[in-house]
Amino acid sequence: MRLKLYRATGMAEAMRRVREELGVDALILSTRRVADGVEVTAGLEPAEAPPPPALADPARMQALGWHAVPAAIARKLQAGPLPFALSVALRFERLALAVGAAPLLLVGPPGAGKTLTCARLATRLVMSGVMPMVITADGRRAGATEQLAAFTRLLGINLLVASQPASLARALARRQDGAPVLIDGPGTDAFDRVQRDEMAALAAACGAGMALVLPAGLDAAESAELAEAHAQSGARLLVATRLDTARRLGGVLAAAGAGLALAEAGIGAGAADGLTPMTPELLADRLIQCPVRLEPPK
């Protein structure tokens, strides 16, 4: 303990000096009157030393580097249980697919897996006993409607087609009993302002939440820029497809680090079991798996 003796003409003056020099946490140990005033003995407990910083796990940092995880995110993941570190560094949320929830609009670049993701989510709902309303808003890609219709026929669902805000609003008027609504959006160039505004208009027409569908394995910087651009049009969630085939997952973490919450992961080819909720545990497991090294050609 740090001790100091103060002499002053009065108690008020002594206390003022104690607070100025030792702070409000100082302890008054004794006081006594002296010939020219008062004498105060005060003490201050030393501040507890901060805990030593957690040491980085070299093997983990090597794995994160191999996955090309952005440095700013990797620093947040360097120590402690990896699932916990991921849950602190990134956001994880479930898709709102309950009865009465706002419609879900799936957006993303062409070929990202939006239609298959829509079919998988519809399959999940049907298998749980809930019949969703499925709408395709993709009027650009040849065969897009037929592809999704093939899935919905197997599920016993009528596929609605509505590629404009007005027709989408009319389609939503047919919603019954608050059924979950899945909307397969067209492939979009998020860096094209017109296309970005079209996506925002579709979402506004029906009050839909927007989830970006993005394949794993993309360049981290590219993924982050795509996530930021789609976030400008209203995307708040991320569905990462092809997690089973991508070798490097830095792009997934970069997109999440750009502000999107990780919601779903594509883990297989099946419609019934090829999509699963993204969790810190699942992502941690994929990150720390030993990379498979390709054998050099003979």
Image (cartoon, helix red, strand yellow):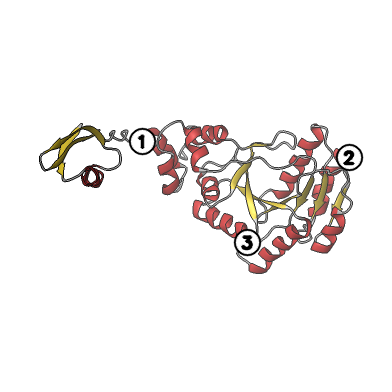
Q: Nearer the viewer, mark 2 or mark 1?
A: 1
Q: Across the whole image, how many numbered discs are drawn on residues?
A: 3
Q: Secondary structure at mark 1?
A: loop
CA distance separating discs 3 and 1: 37 Å
Check if mark 2's residue and mark 1's residue have beta carbons within 8 Å. no
- Which comes sooner in the sequence, label 2 or label 1? 1
Three-letter amino acid code of the residue under disc 1:
Ala
Circle 1 residue:
56
Q: What crowding class fits label 2: few (fewer than 14 Cα within 10 Å), some (14-19), or many (20 or more)?
A: few
CA distance separating discs 2 and 3: 33 Å
Residue 63 shows in the view: yes
Circle 2 residue:
156
Q: Secondary structure at mark 2?
A: loop
In the image, what residue occupies the spot 73% across and 57% down? 203
Q: What crowding class fits label 3: few (fewer than 14 Cα within 10 Å), some (14-19), or many (20 or more)?
A: many
Q: Position of residue 59 (x, y in %)?
A: 39, 33
Check if mark 3's residue and mark 1's residue have beta carbons within 8 Å. no
Three-letter amino acid code of the residue under disc 3:
Ala
- Which comes sooner in the sequence, label 3 or label 1? 1
Q: Nearer the viewer, mark 3 or mark 1?
A: 1
In the image, what residue occupies the spot 80% across and 53% down? 136
CA distance separating discs 2 and 1: 52 Å
Question: Image height check: is 116 above or below 124?
Answer: below
Circle 3 residue:
190
Q: What crowding class fits label 1: few (fewer than 14 Cα within 10 Å), some (14-19), or many (20 or more)?
A: few
The mark found on residue 236 in the picture is none
Q: Nearer the viewer, residue 137 or 148?
A: 137
Q: Residue furthest bottom?
A: 194
Q: Nearer the viewer, residue 287 or 178?
A: 178
In the image, what residue occupies the spot 30% across and 41% down? 24
